Amino acid sequence: MNLILEEISKKNDKVFKIFFDRHYEELVIYANGYLFDKDSSEDIVQEVFIYIWEHASNLNVETSLRGYIFAMVRNRCLNYLKSIKITDNLEYLDFNLTLISEHVFNSTSEDEKVIVYHQVLKIIDTLPEKMQQIVRLKFLHNYKYAEIAKELRVSVNTVKTQLRRAKLRITERLLQF
């Protein structure tokens, strides 16, 4: 068993506090990349630490503890998004249908779909420039994440994060439309 987990399972609050202080801020930033809500991100990270405090002796960490807690935060973020009905069935975005909720496309005429499509293009024009570039490369030019990252000299994770943020912004603005 990991030494830190061993000490936490013995309810060593000093080790737990050091562990908490070392990872809390970074995990909140990580969670916020999924949720775009600092309060919810803080809640999820706190829940993870509470879970670790209460279940340290039962945790089976096969890789690094740091990787394990990041995976816990990611999974809780995804579960939270599912619980509030935000889903991304095609992993990060598929512009054609998931960007605009399925019920809109199932319940509208072809003319309305064209209007919504043009509205989406107008919304894309209002996004920050780097985000616009990423969205256009992905959905208008069918670039893969790695290709976008290479062309724009950013990481693949930056591409994915920007696409998630773009989806949220576009969806919010479409709901206003």
Image (cartoon, rainbow, N blue to C red):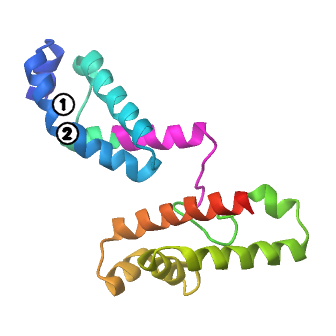
The answer to whether 155 appears left or right of 84 in the picture is left
Label 2 secondary element: helix
Q: Main secondary structure of the magenta part?
A: helix
Camera-nearest residue between 32 and 5 = 32
Circle 2: residue type: His
The answer to whether 113 appears left or right of 9 in the picture is right
Camera-nearest residue between 119 and 26 = 119
Mark 2 is surrounded, within 10 Å at the Cα level, by few (under 14), some (14 to 19) or many (20 or more) other residues, namely some
Find residue 145 and report its horizontal and vertical position in percent. 42, 74
Q: Which residue lies at the image location 65% right of the left edge and 62% below the top edge? A: 173
The answer to whether 177 appears left or right of 36 in the picture is right
Q: Which of the 4 quarters of the picture holds residue 85? A: top right
- Label 1 sits on residue: 20
Instruction: Tell me the quadrant of the picture where the C terminus can be found.
Output: bottom right
**Picture layout, residue 29 above or below residue 101:** above
Whether residue 85 is in magenta: the answer is yes
**Picture layout, residue 87 above or below residue 147:** above
The answer to whether 38 appears left or right of 103 in the picture is left
Q: Are marks 2 and 1 in contact (CB under 8 Å)?
A: yes
Find residue 57 and report its horizontal and vertical position in percent. 22, 18
Q: Which residue lies at the image location 31% right of the left edge and 42% below the top edge? A: 28
Residue at the farthest top position:
10
- Label 2 sits on residue: 23
Q: Which residues are magenta?
A: 72-90
